[in-house]
Image (tube, rainbow, N blue to C red):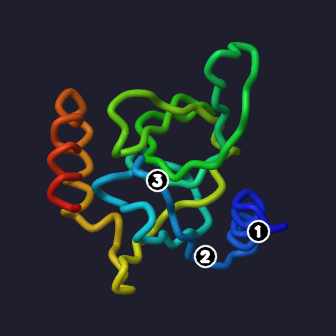
Amino acid sequence: MITDERIIEEAVRLVEDGVCVTLPVDGNSMLPFIIGGKESVILQQSGEPKVGDVVLAWVEKSRAGAPAAVSHLYVVHRIIRIDGDHVTLMGDGNIAGTEHCLRSAIKARVTHVVDENERTHDIYSWWRKLAARLWFWLRPVRRYLLAIYRRVKR
């Protein structure tokens, strides 16, 4: 049986071989910039990560109710801080909470978003970078903005 994890591992292998890979995304953690279930991302080799980059990374997640139990998962999230080899990630659609990984756990860099009409959008255009910076500073009110966004997009 082919699992999501196996598909992502194959995508990572292809990216490491220098191939650009288009990968569908799921979930709401990157709203409003990437719409899970409707859009895909184009992945390329990561190069030197920078704050503001959207990346595919292998992160540790603690399981609720089991403080010693840790699971791993791939996420497509934005880098919000880099301290030496330690990287902090946060989904644009997340109200709180971050993930942490090492630089070596960053497997690919998202370069473009492909919308439901198969149009490709540069995720690092000047206006998207500006919007992402503004969105980051709006964290205290994201909950309300995302609620409005979800109602309008239904």
Q: How far is the residue under mark 2 from the one under mark 3?
A: 19 Å
Q: In which quarter of the image is the N terminus?
A: bottom right
Q: Give the residue at x 70% y 61%.
A: 4
The amino acid pointed to by label 3 is Gly
Give yes or no for contact between labels 3 and 1 (Cβ–Cβ under 8 Å).
Answer: no
Q: In this view, does 115 lie to the left or right of 84?
A: left
Residue sitting nearer the eye, 136 or 86 = 136
Residue sitting nearer the eye, 84 or 24 = 24
Q: In which quarter of the image is the C terminus?
A: bottom left
**To which residue does mark 3 refer?**
27
Q: Secondary structure beneath disc 2?
A: strand
> In which quadrant of the rendered view does residue 19 lie?
bottom right
* Place of residue 44 in the rendered image (x, y in percent of width and height, measured from the top left): 58, 69
Give yes or no for contact between labels 1 and 2 (Cβ–Cβ under 8 Å).
Answer: no
Q: Secondary structure beneath disc 3?
A: loop
Question: Residue lying farthest right?
Answer: 1
Q: In this view, does 151 lie to the left or right of 49?
A: left
Q: Give the residue at x 46% y 53%.
A: 27
Residue depth check, mark 3 versus mark 1: number of the one nearer the observer: 3
**To which residue does mark 1 refer?**
10
The amino acid pointed to by label 1 is Glu
Question: Residue lying farthest bottom?
Answer: 118
Mark 1 or mark 2: which comes first in sequence? 1
**To which residue does mark 2 refer?**
21
